[in-house]
Amino acid sequence: MTGSGPAIPAAPRTGRADAGSRLLHGLRVRLALLLATMFLVFYLITAGLIYGLTAQLTQDNVDAVLGDTTRPLAARVLKDLDRGVFPQEFVTLAKLSEMYPKVSAIVLRDAQGNVIASTAPRVTRTLAYRSAGSAEQFATRQIGSSWYRVLTLPLQNPYRRTVGYLQMALNQDHDRSSLARLAEVLLLVGGLGILFAAAAGFFLSRLWLRPAMRAWQQQERFVADASHELRTPLTVMRLNLDLVLGQPDATIADNGPWLQSIEEEIHRLHRLSDQLLALARSGGAAAASRQSAVDLESLVMRVAAAFRPVAEAKGLALHVETPAPCAPEESFTLPGDPDGLYELLAVLLDNAVKYTTAGSIDVCLQRSRSDIRLEVRDTGIGIEPEHLERIFDRFYRTDLARAKGSGGTGLGLAIARDVALAHGGRISVHSAAGQGTTFTVVLPATSRKS
Ligand code: ADP
């Protein structure tokens, strides 16, 4: 009955799968939001700088035009005022407007600020005037729906006495509407950018989260497989116990087959829990933390000695071959985890004994300059080519192995592979169905980052 309990349906996985996809979806949304927020912050800073800089440059440009236009005019006006004549430029205001077509208004005031002449009375009325003292004064004014940049220039005679003021106003509607258009474009680009960043984050996160999701799914499959494998012997034991308990008058001898089956399942459970523990321990980081110098030759001898009685009981010869290393300084000692390496050797020898009915098992150790090579050869049932790819997967067993009821768990080779990888090495298999199998493990003889 070993390893052939009643067919037990695997535990339902939908709940966990839902939780997995919910978790993935939540993470993707969060990543998308994070990316959108980061984009928003970055964009707000950049757009603010672009807008602020453009507005400042425009203003500087306007101020330069105002200054360059007003100052020469002020010099000429001052000369006339000083001579006590009405400034020639203001004689015909229409001519003045022609001379400065880009200027919206030119206003001449006396020392008290009263308007003497103006090219645009409507603008002049609302052009606020504040005594500027002896300094030039720039100001921005709104008149109706229009905006003006105004320069007020005090007119000072050679005795530094202010005899009047010259004001010049430049309409800024064009600049303002250009700036408003720039703001609109920046807002539009920003809005589209946020949408794009969120969408890109959502779709890219699927790519970024793929390794994590694969690990999650593997873990999920492992838990489901492990619980299924644990449930099988438990169910077999329960069914057998029911049979025993259903016959209260029967003797132990009468119940022998059921009790023996229960004992076998207990062994199976024991082995399964040991291997699950070994699997948990065979990870790279855990193995690395238990590193010490391991003499593989004596370890092979110990494991072979442990399996020789079982092999001989099946009529199999178990040979160990360890040719002396080429150079005297070379040995079969390597840095590693002794427990993990023992488990690896035990798995390979256990399988060789389990799946061989006649012939021999040969263990061979070889040393090259950088690696130690271990081969375990048997003349057993072999492995069909279509299974070779998958025998290192957790819980994978060939149909032939199941049919033989070898009591295996399908975890041994997964543990062996994890141990080899944790030591920076590798494991491979060559097999021909019905002729035998050879497992080869290559381990670095010196510490190597895996
Ligand atoms: P198990 O506990 O079933 O032996 P393993 O992971 O050690 O689990 O091996 C996985 C499967 O690989 C086995 O079920 C068996 O089908 C196959 N296998 C492993 N070693 C051998 C071998 N030496 N000869 C034939 N088949 C083997």
Image (cartoon, rainbow, N blue to C red):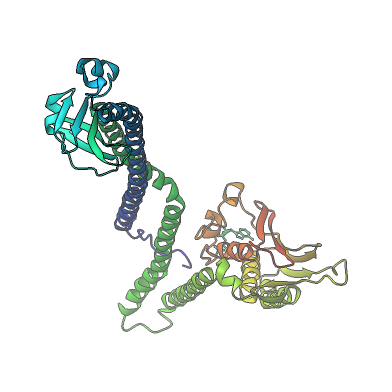
Q: Quadrant of residue 9?
A: bottom left
User: In the displayed structure, would residue 237 be above or below residue 397?
Assistant: below
Which is nearer the eye, 326 or 390?
Answer: 326
Residue 5 horizontal side relative to residue 82, left or right: right
Q: Quadrant of residue 179?
A: top left
Which quarter holds ligand 1? bottom right
Picture coordinates of residue 175, whole percent (x, y): 28, 29
Q: Residue at left 31%, top 83%?
A: 248
Picture coordinates of residue 442, whole percent (x, y): 71, 61
Residue 302 horizontal side relative to residue 284, left or right: right
Query: Does the image show residue 144?
Result: no
Q: Residue at left 43%, top 82%?
A: 253
Which is nearer the eye, 143 or 277?
Answer: 143
User: In the displayed structure, would residue 411 be above or below residue 307?
Assistant: above
Q: Residue at left 44%, top 49%?
A: 208
Which is nearer the eye, 121 or 104?
Answer: 121
Query: Does the image show residue 34?
Result: yes
Picture coordinates of residue 25, whole percent (x, y): 32, 50
In the displayed image of the protein, which residue is found farthest to the front? 83
Picture coordinates of residue 235, whole percent (x, y): 36, 69
Q: Quadrant of residue 178?
A: top left
Residue 432 horizontal side relative to residue 40, left or right: right
Q: Residue at left 25%, top 18%?
A: 96
The C terminus lies in quadrant: bottom right
